[in-house]
């Protein structure tokens, strides 16, 4: 399995979780995947983990494994839920494919 790791600040996604009314902690994430410099197509397995620093930080919540995620023309969308980890501080998403 080819592993691609990507760290992204998703502090802005925390604002999506903070809308009015009762809600859960899940959010949608859309990404773009290339395989050998070409937009990926097919089913891929992903691992997502959330961290409190870009490097050397602490993992928040558990690692989420999603299998057979459809990627079409490089685009994919998944729903992620790391639990109650949104306290206003920056968060960083690591993705392995």
Image (cartoon, helix red, strand yellow):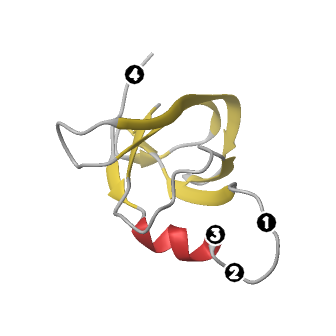
Describe the element under mark 3 as helix, strand or loop. helix
Residue 64 x, y percent position in the rendering: 59, 31
Label 4 near label 2: C-beta < 8 Å?
no
Residue 48 x, y percent position in the rendering: 50, 37
> Is residue 48 in sight in this rendering?
no
Cα separation between marks 1 and 4: 36 Å
The numbered dot on residue 19 is 2
The numbered dot on residue 2 is 4
The numbered dot on residue 17 is 3
Single out the residue that lies furthest toward the top. 1
Q: How many marks?
A: 4
User: Relative to residue 21, is residue 95 drawn left or right?
Assistant: left
Residue 17 x, y percent position in the rendering: 64, 69
Quadrant assignment, res 50: top left
Residue for badge 1: 23
Label 4 near label 1: C-beta < 8 Å?
no
Q: Residue at x 42, y 69 (%)?
A: 88
| Within-10-Å neighbours for mark 3: few <14, some 14–19, many 20+ | some
The numbered dot on residue 12 is none
Viewer-proximal residue among 47 and 56: 56
Quadrant assignment, res 27: bottom right
* Of pointers 1 and 4, the one earlier in the residue sequence: 4
Q: Nearer the viewer, mark 3 or mark 4?
A: 3
Single out the residue that lies furthest toward the left. 56
Q: Give the quarter of the figure containing the N terminus.
A: top left
Label 1 near label 2: C-beta < 8 Å?
yes
* Of pointers 1 and 3, the one earlier in the residue sequence: 3
Label 3 near label 1: C-beta < 8 Å?
yes
């Amino acid at each position: 399995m080819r592993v691609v790791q990507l760290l992204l600040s998703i502090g802005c996604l925390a604002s999506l979780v903070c809308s009015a009314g009762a809600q859960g902690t899940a959010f949608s994430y859309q990404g773009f995947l290339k395989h050998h410099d070409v937009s990926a197509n097919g089913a891929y397995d992903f691992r997502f983990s959330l961290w409190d620093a870009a490097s050397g930080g602490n993992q928040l919540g558990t690692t989420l494994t999603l299998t057979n995620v459809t990627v079409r023309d490089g685009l994919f969308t998944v729903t992620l839920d790391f639990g109650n980890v949104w306290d206003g501080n920056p968060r960083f998403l690591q993705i392995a494919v």
